[in-house]
Amino acid sequence: MKKIEAIIKPFKLDDLKAAMTELGVQGMTVSEVKGFGRQKGHTEIYRGAEYVVDFIPKVKVEIVVATEMVEKVVNTIVATVKTGKIGDGKIFVLPVDSICRIRTGETDKEAI
Amino acid sequence: MDSSIAKKLVLPLTMAMVALAGNAMAGEGAAEITGAAATYVANNTWMLVATFLVFIMHLGFATLEAGLTRSKNTVNILFKNTAIVALGLLTYAVIGFNLMYPGDFSIPGIFGFSGFGIGVSPENMMVTGDDGVGIYTYWTDFIFQAMFAATAATIVSGAVAERVKLHSFLIFSAIYVAVVYPWVGSWKWGGGWLDAMGFYDFAGSTLVHSVGGWAALAGVILLGPRLGKYVGNTIKPIMGHNMPLATIGVFLLWLGWFGFNGGSVLSADPVAVSFVFVTTSLAAAAGIVGASALSWIIQKKPDLSMALNGALAGLVGITAGADVVSVMSSVVIGLIAGALVVVSVMVVDRMKLDDPVGAISVHLVCGIWGTLAVGIFSASHSFVTQLIGVAAYGVTCFVAAFVLFYLLKITLGIRVDEEEEMKGLDIGEHGMEAYAGFEIKNV
């Protein structure tokens, strides 16, 4: 079992959700984050004082899937959210030790 | 209303209507209600409307200040604004009104006090204008002026926001609005030495706005800037958390200004009041244009908070002379005020004086500008006399406020400690949050 963490541009979230549903991915957790990679920030001025905004709003999507699904899911995410412009984001794949569905007590594969 | 009350009203109302109708047919006669009496009612009614228009400016200040500061200090800002209305009205009833309008000066032209507490005998209830027609009741006079008093105090709260200690601020405000504001106000509106000299301040560019502005300046100097605002020689902007609230605030203030300036005519005189409405609004509009244009040029993009400050700048700027300058002049005054406020905000910042809402720029700088503008744009008023007035208020108010703040600084302290400033004054001073539902709680 693996956890896929994708940092994406916020306006791509709806497309990603639709694509995941089509793939059969049952659920996801989404959070609003800020971050930067090699994408530079921009300068703003507030009441005459300049400041640099380094942190860009992004959306972090967390999905847990069976290991066999990982490659398909990652490729689908890339295809869905890629714009080709700087700041498209990154995907991280992490191992998952165990899972538990709270309501039923199912574990691991049954809990995905 | 229930029928017994309705019956009690029907007879007098009918009589009044019959009397007025009789009046209309018979001209000025021995009817129940004379033209003078009707004018008295009209004047007084307008003054009461003006009173609650000025009242709503407190909501304007509260929302404007809240919008231009950080959400962790919002409860504190709102509390200060709420408390100031209370302090202003109550102290004005006990001390301020009789200090500002003493009638007789025990130190000629300089100081007079007609006793603690408001109250009037029936024969003095009606206040008349120069032509002997009633303009308002004693109570109207009091409550209208009382609303003004509180607005002077609230100007300070924005400038000292996000780091001033609540109890010290409340003590300062109580003393400043109870004593300083009415005392210096008596010099002009109470018939004191500046009035005798010909100094002119129609609705308070000096008496209200710069009186508040000087105190704001004193407070800002003695408080010091917010943590993190000035790092070395860089200015690190601290953005306001809610632009919609700030906008609501400014438009409420503009709304209130119809009463602030319109009511300063001190009657419902159709030409005078309507003219003041025009000059006031055109100055506000010009202020927006002046500020937006300059901000657009300097900042490359127009800054909403500057545009909003521009409206206020225009309003403050016209307040000294709304009834004596021409329509064209009011536009010029507003335009210059708008430009002035943008420049002033930046200059004040570069002097490392941290003013979160631009109170010094709007109320002090443009209050001075508006007062001097009367000497420039009105042929019947002297620039030098206006300047003397500005200087007199400047010295007195700045010194008084500085001394007050300084005494509080060395005794109670006027600033919260660093940890509290980081966590936010809402937690530190009030133990509550402004936006409690926005966080994940354990309930």
Image: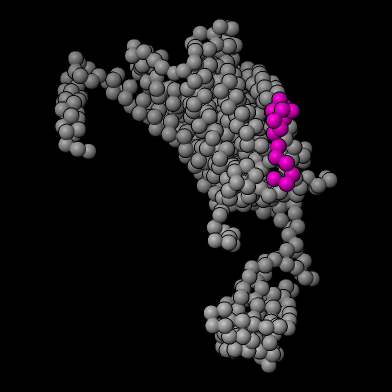
Q: Quadrant of residue B429?
A: top right
Residue A33 appears anywhere in the view: yes
Q: Position of residue B281 (x, y in %)?
A: 50, 38
Q: Position of residue B368 (x, y in %)?
A: 64, 28
Quadrant housing the C terminus of chain B: bottom right
Outermost residue toward the front in this view: A105
Q: Is residue B268 left or right of residue A13?
A: left
Q: Is residue A77 left or right of residue B94?
A: right
The colour scheme applied to this rendered structure is one colour
Q: Main secondary structure of the magenta part?
A: helix
In this view, the residue in front, B185 or B378, is B185
Q: Quadrant of residue A57?
A: bottom right
Q: Taking A20 as reference, is B19 above or below it?
A: above
Residue at image location 68% in from the left, 87% down from the top: A1
Q: Taking B268 as reference, is B226 above or below it?
A: below
Q: Is residue B51 left or right of residue B150?
A: left
Residue at image location 70% in from the left, 45% down from the top: B421
In this view, the residue in front, A40 or B71, is B71
Q: Position of residue B267 (x, y in %)?
A: 40, 24
Q: Taking B266 as reference, is A60 above or below it?
A: below
Q: Position of residue B129 (x, y in %)?
A: 40, 16
Q: Magenta residues?
A: B405-420
